[in-house]
Amino acid sequence: MAHRMTNSMRTCYLQACRTFIAVCCLLLFSSLVFADEQVKAVPAEYRSKNFLLTTDLDEEEAEALLTRLETMLRIVSRYWGAPSRKTIRLFVAEDLGRWPPGRLPPEGETAIRQGGITLARGMRYGRRFDFDAIVYSSAAGGTPQHEAVHAYCYQTFGETGPTWYAEGMAEMGNYWDENDPTVTCPDYIIEFLKRSPRPTVEEITVSDDVSGDGWRKYAWRWALCHFLANNTNYAERFRVLGSNYLSGGKPSFERTFETTLPELEFEFDFFLDHLERGFDVGQCSWDWSARFRELKEKPIAAKVQADRGWQSGAIRVIQGQRIAYRATGEWQLLKEELEPGESVCTADGLDDGSGKLVATIRTSTGLIKEFELGSKGVLEISESGDLYLRCREPWSLIRDNSGTVNVEFQASPPN
Ligand SMILES: [Zn+2]
């Protein structure tokens, strides 16, 4: 039962999050060796500022988990603008064979075998609410952080929002790194998202989905939430949409983004096309306010930053047109194998081809294959559309670049 409200005085929520496959063989193995290993027979309790953790992890691992949970909570509290109202109670099991019979309720034990669950019990009178949430989670991967996001939402807002939002944001909590806004999820998630048929944004945000429907659906929800929370074109509206969900409202996703849905879908596709660890959604946000003009007699200039994705080249090009260009200025690409001074270059780039000024054209059907410019030359335009420019480097590496190059375009006589 997920996100079901009743009119009874005592409202119960049950949220199943089966993000990990049960490790039954591990469990069997553990029970075989249990007789020889009585050292950690009883799970122990650990406390931090916002969490009370009962676990069979050893003390060092338990303290490390509490640190990760506190970090995650600091990030989500800042994001939603509300400190955690109550201590979050967690039962985290690495090996159920180490737990005495009856120490966990049957539903908690079953859920731990499948990943985790957050159970919330409490009351709601109109806008007032009081909920207590308990997490039962496997110690595997980031499941405790994922479940703790649900628990925080229940206790702080009395809501978690529709399934796609609740699970997408909980997966963000799973992968969130305080000092790194780039893609940090595991490789198997990235591989899955890149090789699978893509659902539409509308399909991801269907409101009648229920939790616990498999890690693949969770991966799509994470991708959409990560994209919307970090893209500068949509982040603020997405935050407001989320706050409305968490205050018990029923805002419409379509209506929230209806004026920019084609741009949003284009950028979400672009994100999935270039998805890799280290991809920075914020730095690669498209500037939809940029104006593109056809070249007449007067030259047109554009600025290109080394640490951004595709940026406006300011000109609308026409098939068959010849355009002379000249780029001035320098930028820097930090590289481990180079001294800082050796990584400064012009639009011609470094010896390995990185740092070169490159372009694409956004036509009526999408982006054409990237092509090289360098610091000067003449472009023979193969397709009509808007010209975009960037400093060439793998998408995961552009974040630490610096510097700007200025490019001037001038119409050139036909051959
Ligand atoms: Zn969940």
Image (cartoon, helix red, strand yellow):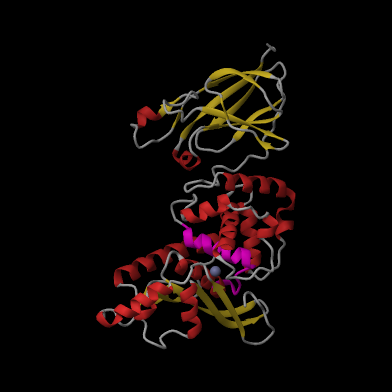
Total marks in image: 0
Residue 138 appears in which quarter of the rendering?
A: bottom left
Q: Say which residue appears at 53% left-offset and 27% top-offset.
A: 357
Residue 287 appears in which quarter of the rendering?
A: top right
Q: Position of residue 194 (x, y in %)?
A: 56, 50
Residue 96 included in the magenta stretch of the image: no
Residue 87 seen in this snapshot? no
Q: Which quarter of the image is occupied by the N terminus?
A: bottom right
The front one of 343 and 395 is 395
In this view, 346 is above or below 230: above
The front one of 243 and 294 is 294
- In this rendering, would 16 be left or right of 136? right
Q: Say which residue appears at 72% left-offset and 18% top-offset.
A: 296
The front one of 78 and 121 is 121
Residue 319 appears in which quarter of the rendering?
A: top right
In this view, 65 is above or below 396: below
Q: Position of residue 77 (x, y in %)?
A: 51, 64
In this view, 106 is above or below 239: below
Q: Say which residue appears at 56% left-offset and 53% top-offset.
A: 193
Q: Which residues are magenta?
A: 156-176
View quadrant of ligand 1: bottom right
Residue 357 seen in this snapshot? yes
Q: Position of residue 151 (x, y in %)?
A: 52, 73
